[in-house]
Amino acid sequence: MSDIRLPIIEYLLTVALPLVRQEGEEKSALEEITPEPVETAAQTVMESLERIWDNFLGHVPYVIASIMVLAVTCLVVALLRRFGSKLFRRTTSRKSLQDLLVRLLTIVVWLLGLLFAAMVLFPGLTPARALGAVGLLSVAIGLAFKDIFENFFAGILILWRFPFEEGDVIECEGIVGRVEAVEVRNTNIRRMTGELVVVPNLFLFKNPCEILTNRNKRRVSITAGVAYGEDVAEAVGVIEKALASCRTVRDDEPIQVFPQAFGDSSIDIEVTWWTGSTPLQYASRQEK
């Protein structure tokens, strides 16, 4: 029995007794913890608020300086928008290209102004860190606004290549009208019936676009019918004479009138002439 009791006593002395002591010490420590008085807690909160206010007051000059940088940026952008076309008038005579250069320069000025304002507001911010943050942010924004950026770059390409200008009449996938404004993201087209159509630039960039007023004249072709039994040569002469007397027919291009085919009830005659490129001049062929 003595051999069995010795290991038990040794276990109690080496393991159980320290655990009991530790448990007693923890209970006594918990008993000694008392809640902090309300006055002390309020004083701690007030000290924290005072530190926050002092930090804010110490940072006010940086805030004012950053606001001044943004104000200067707005002033430079306003001057560019007002006098930018005159500035680039010597570079190119195309109004669309002048507008593109002004818009690109405006974007660059805004980016630089925001970068400088951020560096002034946060003195520890370096250009490398700012550009890195802008790079990560641009990736996220590019993924979120993919369609907007596609229209933006399509607008830049359209303005750079200047296939059409404000005032031109274009036709694209059934949309026919006069171009009122070529913006970076959208193009405003006024239909001949008066409605305004806002077309995304990517739509105009991907689809075939006919510029009806690219030249100052257009060719018109219609088919006229002469009944069987009539003198075809005399009919051709009458048609040519009638076309020559029309004010909308250009006299610097030949009038072409010639029989084309035998129809069901008449001889088809193709009549071709040149007129102005505007919709009114083109539609006036109905007067003939």
Image (tube, helix red, strand yellow):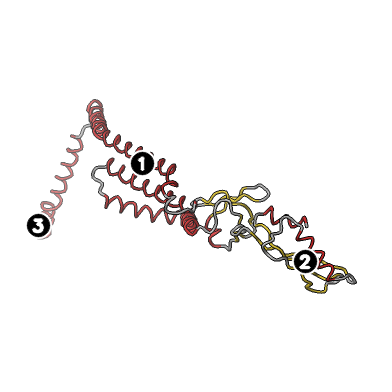
Tell me the number on the disc at residue 73.
Answer: 1
Q: Which amino acid type is shown beneath numbered disc 1? A: Thr
Q: 183 above or below 268?
A: above
Please tell me whether mark 3 sits on a helix, a strand or a loop: helix
**Marks 3 and 1, the one that precedes in the sequence:** 3
Name the one closer to the observer, 11 or 238: 238
Q: Secondary structure at mark 2?
A: strand
Q: How busy is the neighbourhood of tag 3: few (under 14 within 10 Å), some, or many (20 plus)?
A: few
Question: Which dot marks residue 6?
Answer: 3
Residue 208 lies in quadrant: bottom right
Q: Nearer the viewer, mark 3 or mark 1?
A: 1
Tell me which corner region of the image, top left, top right, bottom left or bottom right, holds residue 256.
Answer: bottom right
Give the spatial CA distance, label 2 vs label 3: 126 Å
Dot 2 or dot 3, earlier in sequence: 3
Q: Residue 55's spot in the image, x, y percent?
A: 24, 34
- The residue at which mark 2 appears reads as 223
C-alpha separation, residue under disc 3 versus residue under disc 1: 89 Å
Q: Residue at x 81, y 68 (%)?
A: 236
- Residue that extends furthest to the top in the rendered view of this protein: 39
What is the three-letter code of the residue carrying label 3?
Leu
Q: Residue at x 80, y 65 (%)?
A: 224
Along the line of sight, which residue is nearer the eye, 179 or 151?
179
Residue at the far bottom in the pictured view? 262
